[in-house]
Image (spheres, rainbow, N blue to C red):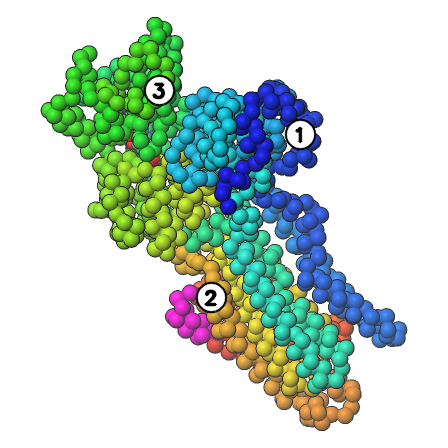
Amino acid sequence: MNKASLLNDRMEKYAHSDTTVLYNDLGISRNGLRLEQLEEMKKKYGDNNIVSRKSDTIWFRLRRAFINPFTIILFVLAIVSFVTDIWRTNNFNKNVTTVIIIIVMILVSGTVRFIQEIRAKHAYDQLDRLVHTHVNVKRDGVIIKVPAEDLVVGDLIYLSAGDRVPADMRLTNTRDLFVSQSAITGESGILEKNSRQHKYTEQMAFSQYENLVFMGTTVISGKGEGVVLAVGKETLYGNFIQPNALTSNSFEKGANSIAWVLLRFMAVLVPIVFIISGITKGNWMESFLFALSVAVGLTPEMLPMVITTCLAKGSISMSKKQTIIKNINAMQVFGSMDVLCMDKTGTLTNVAIVLEYYMDILGNESNEVLRFAYLNSLYHSGVKNPIDNAILKCRNMPGKNEYYEDLARQYHKADEIPFDYSRKYVSTLIADDNGNHQLVMKGDVGAVFSRCAFVEYQGTVQPISEDGRSSVAAVVDEMLGDGMKVIAVARKDLDNQKTLSLPDESNMILMGYLAFFDAPKKSAAQSIAKLKNLQVKTKILTGDHQQIALSICSRIGIASEKILTGADINGLSDLELQLAVEKTDVFAELTPSQKVRIVTALRDNGHTVGFLGDGMNDIPAICEADVGISVDTAVDAAKDVADVILLQKDLNVLEEGILEGRKTFTNMSKYIKITASSNFGNILSIVCASAFLPFLPIAAIQILLLNLLYDILCIVLPWDHVDQEVFSSSREWSGKMLGRFMRFFGPISSIFDVITFLFLYFVLCPTLTGGLLFTQLTDPAMKFRYIALFQTGWFLESMWTQVLIIHMLRTKKIPFLQSRPSAPVMLITVIGILLFTGLTFTPMVDVLGLTVLPPWYFGFLLVVVASYMLLTTVLKRIYIAKYDELI
Ligand SMILES: Nc1ncnc2c1ncn2[C@@H]1O[C@H](COP(=O)(O)OP(=O)(O)OP(=O)(O)O)[C@@H](O)[C@H]1O
Ligand SMILES: [Mg+2]
């Protein structure tokens, strides 16, 4: 579809009309909306959310916690049990335990889920507040800051450099407003916008409407005011962005698909269990109950909760470590990042740079050069970057304050052409009281020099000679060699010309240079080494001069034999670049689009790429990277597009964040993999047992009890420790790995289950029931005892192995000895095992259909559990050797 046709009707209509018509039609004034109009506008045109937020209400969360497939199965089970055990039974045989246990399970799992969800929401809300963009809006005559989501049609918005446009708007007033529409058009050019009424022309592309700005685009420089005409999904951006790209992330999708695989698995196997045990036992009601509880036992009901808890817990610990995860999916990607691209300022060098020298073309100190540079910095309305900040700081020099105030009074601004990282210079037109206009340009030495035809030296202007060219180059080279950042300043008289256009930027007079000291950070080398330990390669992508990049790298102590410049890259094909990016770690003199090309090449090579940057020039690369990282002090537009925000621009912070991300990811996959494989093993054993045993291997209520214990253990799993080695490498998630893991480890437990079945059936039970096998027994009381002995035996074996397998598989090392679980996991394990084993010695056994086992059974149990753990350890080694990973 033609994108232009997606343009909102209102936008099109009012682009062609005068602003007064717009004000009248919408019933607003120049004071903005009245507060009482807000609700009405919201009702009429919707709110400014691309993702609907139905999941935000408490009611929704309550429903989600208590009404899900798992609780529904439990409800059915409770009702059936109520009917069979209580209602239709005589007074003597009434048994309320099953119903009580089931209700406890529903309450426990529901409440835990609910609490977790609320906590997670709370955490996100808090983080949200930190990262949310606020917009300047005039309402009822007062300019206030509101979150971008709260905007409604009719709101009067104020935009300035560095902002991301929060909704689709018709401009009503502008001052040198330049916008980059690359987010929606894909083209990198910068366009000037104005508020004039559009004259009607045939079929125009939306991007050509000069008086409209669109959600998602970025203000490069200048100021603007406008009225919101379309919000949320009605905007151009909301229209073509995939809604599901925003709502569900790939990890969640992966986790859900696992849940579905397990459920489908269950849907096939549970009926089989039902039919087999129905046929072999002849009691269909009992078999139905049994099959249902097998279903409950196998439902990965804790999966959503464990994932939300892990993510919430991870993002809270990360925020404590100064890292804010804006997009929760990024957590997982963040952990799997193996290449980190970053800019130079703030990561390798200090955030603030210092103006060291201001000099004429031959290197003598020159106040004149500083004066013009100061005016240029003061009057350009783009985002002020470290260079401008360093220049503007000169007014704080002792005794200079007044001088610079006078200067600002003497000259005022007439026009500008904003700074653009592709052109690498900025022009401002300044005028004095006599109406004389001067164009002042500052920027990259090469770029500015190419616009100059003259040089100025000690007040005289001369054409540039070959000779002059080389002496100029010598001065600059010396500075660059010292690791100084150098920019050039040029000027041109424009007499009474009041506006600027591109052709004016030629035949300029080169005045001199400013040199800045970009102090390398002491900690940088160490941080890079730490990242290397985490198997994250670092690459430096800077717009700065290659000599500076080299000198800083050598000062910090990073090897940088190979360096590629923007010009070099332009000469490479995509394929050549793909090869080159692997061999090179430092890239210099890049434009924003070249930064994107490098990131793309790395991604095409199969890397998971992070990009850390804070300037306007980094925005496209931040968007392109798998995980975009920005810092709290960055321009709003960069923070808006980033997935991760560091509260401090420091590589150490990043390292801790990555570790935390990997930890979270490991705990999630731990749960998923172990649960899936132990479920798989259990169902195998149950199918075997139902086919060959003349009675049920385990009672419904016992399955439920086991499940309760396992669930409680899983609730504390997000708080488990993670081995150092596991998170020292990047990780990726895939369903294939899960399947492999499940098939490998699942059946191991079945082997020991079958051994236990055989032992119980042929040894233990007959010994205690007079030496006969079940089928040879005639006395119903004996039969009953036989079953109880068998079921208790398996109940205990199943419980021990299921709990201990978590400990076996949670680490590559020897559990307990080499790798300790966290205290809560350990505590629940010990309490669970003791409690459940102890239970078989209490009067409770009767209600649960269990019985007291002789002490020598525990000798057998010990042997089985020990051999199970031994075998798992051996097979774990084989698995790790083969696949080089475990969890
Ligand atoms: N405010 C400015 N005024 C004039 N020229 C500028 C300004 N900011 C940057 N430049 C020019 O553009 C070039 C690239 O900018 P800059 O060094 O900020 O790029 P970068 O990629 O952000 O670098 P870094 O890796 O240090 O963050 C600079 O070397 C300088 O010549
Ligand atoms: Mg930068």
In front here: 767 or 332?
332
Magenta-colored stretch includes residue 703: no
Q: What residue is disc 3 on? A: 500
Name the residue rendered at 60%, 71% in the picture: 265
- Secondary structure under the numbered disc 3 in the rendered image: loop
Name the residue rendered at 39%, 42% in the picture: 621
On screen, 139 above or below 337? above
- Secondary structure under the numbered disc 2 in the rendered image: helix
User: In the image, residue 640 lies at what x, y percent?
Assistant: 48, 38
On screen, 251 above or below 325? below
Q: Can residue 601 be seen in this view?
A: yes
Q: Nearer the viewer, mark 1 or mark 3?
A: 3
Contact between labelled residues 3 and 1, with CB atoms less than 8 Å apart: no
Which amino acid, by three-letter code, is at mark 1?
Answer: Leu
Which amino acid, by three-letter code, is at mark 3?
Answer: Leu
Magenta-colored stretch includes residue 882: yes
Q: Which mark is residue 38?
A: 1
Q: What residue is disc 2 on? A: 737
Neighbor class of circle 1 (other Cα within 10 Å; few <14, some 14-19, many 20+) is: some
Q: Nearer the viewer, mark 1 or mark 2?
A: 1
User: In the image, residue 705 lies at what x, y percent?
Assistant: 68, 68
Q: In which quarter of the image is ligand 2?
A: top left
Sequence order check, earlier mark of 3 and 2: 3
